[in-house]
Amino acid sequence: MQIPNIPTDNIYKFMALSGLLTCILFILYPKHLINELRMDLILTSEKSAIMSLTINAELAAIQRKIKRLEIEKPAPDEIGKLWDITSALKSLELKKDINKETQATYTKLHMFKNERINELVGLMFIGIAISISLSLSGFLLWYRRVQRPLDKKLEEEALTGYTNTVTPVSFQHESSIYSHRLSRRIQR
C-alpha cells in the first residue's frame, strides 16, 4: 500500500492538513482509552459481583449444614463436623471482611476511573477545538495569501492573453491575405 504524498508545498496547506490529522487523532485515541477504562470498570464490577456471590453461596451452604445439624442432633463422635462448620464460618466471616474492603477499593477505583474518563473527554474536546482552529486558520490563510493571488494572476493572464490573440476581424484580414497569395500561386 502506497501512502499518498501530503501537499506540503506551503505552510498553510501543512497547517490545514495537520489540523485535520490531529483532529482525527483527538477523536480516535481518547475514545480508545475511554473504551479501555470502561471495560476495566465492567471487569472489576464483575469480579466484585462474583466474589460477593461466592461468599453468599458459601454462607448459604454453611447455614444449611447448621440447620441440618440442629435437626439431626449430632452424636458425640460427630463433634468434628461442628468444628469444621465453625472454622468454615470464621473463614467466611474473614472473607466477608475482605470482600467489604475489596468493595471499598473497587468503589474508589470506579471513582478514579470515572474521573479519568471525564478528564479524557475534556481533553478530547479541547484538542478537537484546537485542531479545528488550526485547520481552519490554515485553509483561510492558504486561500487568502496563496490562492487569491494565483486566481488574480490567472485572470490577468487570461485577459491579457485574450487581447493578444487573433480576433475575428484580424482573422478575416489574415485569411484574405493567405487566400490572395494562394490564388497567385494557382495562377502561376
Image (cartoon, rainbow, N blue to C red):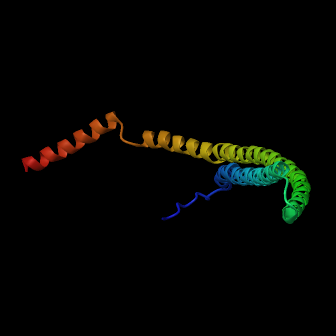
Q: Is residue 143 left or right of residue 71?
A: left
> In percent of the image, x 65 and y 45: which residue is there?
139
Residue 84 visible? no
Q: Is residue 62 above or below residue 118?
A: below
Q: In this view, does 49 lie to the left or right of 185?
A: right
Name the residue nearer the viewer: 26 or 38. Answer: 38
Residue 78 visible? yes
Residue that sits furthest to the left in the current view: 187
Q: Is residue 76 left or right of residue 162?
A: right
Residue 3 in picture, x, y percent from top left? 53, 63
How many marks the image carries: the answer is 0
Q: In which quarter of the image is residue 54?
A: bottom right
> In percent of the image, x 18 and y 42: which residue is there?
180
Name the residue nearer the viewer: 133 or 88. Answer: 88
Name the residue nearer the viewer: 123 or 173. Answer: 123
Residue 116 in picture, x, y percent from top left? 83, 51
Residue that sits furthest to the top in the current view: 169
Q: In which quarter of the image is residue 174?
A: top left
> In percent of the image, x 74 and y 51: which residue is there?
46
Residue 105 in picture, x, y percent from top left? 89, 54
